[in-house]
Amino acid sequence: MFLGTYAPKLDDKGRIILPAKFREELASGVVVTRGQERCLYVFSQREFEVMHEAIRKAPVTSKQGRDFLRLFLSGANQETPDKQHRVTIPASLREYAGLGRDLTVIGAGNRAEIWDTEAWNNYYEATEADFANTTEEVIPGLF
């Protein structure tokens, strides 16, 4: 499970060093793709295959399903981390997420997310009050 918040830097070649706590899970392969809210999702190869199986079950007649599948898979980049635990973020994904040099990587359970630090701070500020004030059942069985 991916947990926590980290602050790596994007190097001049568009690479990021994976947080130490994520390395074992991602060592055999990583898939980086477009996420929602203009972040990037980072999956282990195994978890990405689970996600793909779930997504492909959407009926081909569902426009929303087709749109999600197209955007999710067309942005996917698969690779194996190098010996320094780095992965390259393709230029198209860096542009999509508006990544600068300062990044915030968060654990989000079955995936990690890569955010431009300023975008993460803005998102956090905009949503923290709603999180703190959650009074109804948003996630069934949680509250």
Image: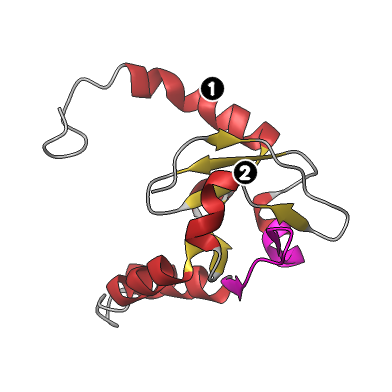
Q: Where 51 falls versus 114 (above or below)?
A: below
Percent x, y of residue 104: 63, 38
Q: Is residue 85 left or right of residue 3?
A: right
Residue type at numbered disc 1: Glu
Q: Is residue 107 left or right of residue 135?
A: right
Percent x, y of residue 41: 52, 56
Q: Where 45 falls versus 35 (above or below)?
A: below
Residue drawn at x 66%, y 57% as measured from the top left: 96
Q: Where 81 falls versus 20 (above or below)?
A: below
- Look at the image and say whether residue 54 sits in the magenta stretch: no
Quarter of image, res 77: bottom right
- The figure's colour scheme reads secondary structure
Disc 1 designates what residue? 125
Magenta highlight range: 76-94
Q: Tag on residue 115? A: 2
Of residues 140 and 87, the one nearer the viewer is 87
Q: Secondary structure at mark 2?
A: strand
